[in-house]
Amino acid sequence: MVVDLDLHKPKQAVAWNMTNDVGVTSYIVGKATLKDTLKDTPVENLKVILSGPKSPNASELILDSMMEQLINELKEHFDYIILDMPPVGLLSDALVMMKHSDLNLYVMKAGYSKKDFVEVAHQLMEKNQIKSLSFILNGVNPKNMPVGYGGAYYK
């Protein structure tokens, strides 16, 4: 299960080529049930809940008690729930949800993200009592990898 919780700049609808007509925001304001929000993807056994219609108070919706109800309802039906959140350094939305997750992934882009972001992430983790944080480095060009274990596989 993938849930698009980037209520400011949602991307899952575009990624799955879907219409973002119903989703998280619809559920939180009481205009849709969980069943109404679930959408099938081309990936076997993978469903998605899109962000839903834009809301002027997106960050407040994350704090709404209905958000916790949504997560609890999803836990009853799915083994794994992936929450796609906005960047943790820009908005507080992700920090709110990180405290309740089993695993948090901090995605960095090679050649774009600054090294300081790692220290900022560690500080956020300690300050907010986040229990787990793992890093993903994407956008790595295999041609730039050093020769040695792993590097020789790309020649």
Image (cartoon, rainbow, N blue to C red):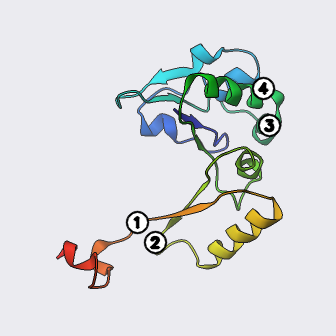
Residue at the disc numbered 1: 139
Local SS, label 1: loop
* Dot 2 or dot 4, earlier in sequence: 4
* Dot 3 or dot 1, earlier in sequence: 3
Q: CA distance from mark 3 to mark 2?
A: 33 Å
Q: Amino acid at mark 2?
A: Ala
Local SS, label 4: helix
* Dot 4 or dot 1, earlier in sequence: 4
Residue at the disc numbered 3: 57
Q: Residue 134, relative to residue 71: is it above or below?
A: below
The x, y position of residue 13, in whole percent, is 49, 34
The x, y position of residue 120, in whole percent, is 71, 72
The x, y position of residue 95, in whole percent, is 75, 52
Residue at the disc numbered 4: 66
Q: Amino acid at mark 3?
A: Asn
**CB-based contact (under 8 Å), mark 2 and mark 1:** yes
Q: CA distance from mark 4 to mark 1?
A: 36 Å
Residue at the disc numbered 2: 110
Q: CA distance from mark 2 to mark 4?
A: 37 Å
Quadrant placement of the C terminus: bottom left
* Dot 4 or dot 3, earlier in sequence: 3
Q: CA distance from mark 3 to mark 1?
A: 33 Å
Q: CA distance from mark 2 to mark 1?
A: 5 Å
Q: Amino acid at mark 4?
A: Met
- Snapshot quadrant of residue 151: bottom left
* Dot 2 or dot 1, earlier in sequence: 2
* Dot 3 or dot 2, earlier in sequence: 3
